[in-house]
Image (tube, grey):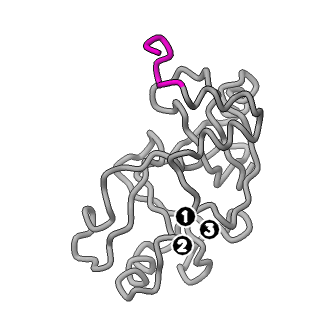
Amino acid sequence: MDGKLLIAHPLLNDGFFNRAVIYMTNNNDEGSFGFILNFKTEFKLRDIRPQIKNGNFPIYEGGPVAKDQLFFLHTLGQKVNDSFHVKDNIYFGGDFNDMLQLIEHGKVKQHEVRFFMGYSGWGEEQLEKEIKTTSWMVNDHDSDDLLTINYSDLWKQKLEEINQNYGIFAEIGFDPSVN
């Protein structure tokens, strides 16, 4: 499932993951790991590392696990030592100091990296069970635009790719009882 998207089912009633679209970076016998792509925070990299000039990179809510840690996806490959190749041109993590140096020297553009506070994780076979109970829908995505697509409409776009009729759910507020 590495490099695939998890799309929260429209009827998923989980306060944290409602309307989430998650990019999966790792899925194996021990568990699964990914980042919510469409929950942007009010924070920028400069808020966490004020000494970094050029630190105007937005930070996204990656998930409810390890929210006190910063993670990143990027398209820089081995320019960032110890990066883990996920799929196509997408890499996960690597040496954070390498990334900061590249940013400091203006060698990284915002469309080449995305920062996340926390991550989304599942234990052994937990995600597979949630998919079977229709909490999540799995979808492919072209990695070329993963870090540049419009995240505000991502959930709706992915729902409509799965089933054109699902788009109506995006028009309904978070709590359908108040519509």
**Residue at the spot x=71%, y=37% of the render?**
160
- In the picture shown, does residue 157 fall above or below 146? above
Q: Label 3 sits on what residue type?
A: Tyr
Q: Along the polypeptide, which appears first: circle 3 or circle 1?
A: 1
Q: Label 2 sits on what residue type?
A: Glu
**Residue at the spot x=59%, y=23% of the render?**
12
The residue singled out by tag 1 in the image is 73
- In the picture shown, does residue 26 fall above or below 109? above
Helix, strand or loop at disc 3?
A: strand
Whether the residues at callouts 3 and 1 have beta carbons within 8 Å, the answer is yes
Q: Label 1 sits on what residue type?
A: Leu
The residue singled out by tag 3 in the image is 91
Q: Which label sits on residue 160?
A: none
Helix, strand or loop at disc 1?
A: strand
User: x, y percentage for residue 68?
Assistant: 34, 50
- Asked whether 142 or 1 is in front, the reply is 142
User: x, y percentage for residue 117?
Assistant: 40, 52
On screen, residue 105 versus residue 175, left or right, reads: left
The residue segment tinted magenta is 172-179
Which marked residue is nearer to the observer: mark 2 or mark 1? 2
Quarter assignment of residue 158: top right
Quarter assignment of residue 135: top right
**Residue at the spot x=75%, y=44% of the render?**
139
On screen, residue 140 versus residue 9, left or right, reads: right
Q: Which label sits on residue 112?
A: 2
User: x, y percentage for residue 77?
Assistant: 62, 77
Give the distance between the C-alpha atoms of the residues marked 2 and 3, in whole angstroms.
10 Å
- Asked whether 101 or 148 is in front, the reply is 148
Q: Along the polypeptide, which appears first: circle 2 or circle 3?
A: 3
**Residue 178 part of the magenta segment:** yes
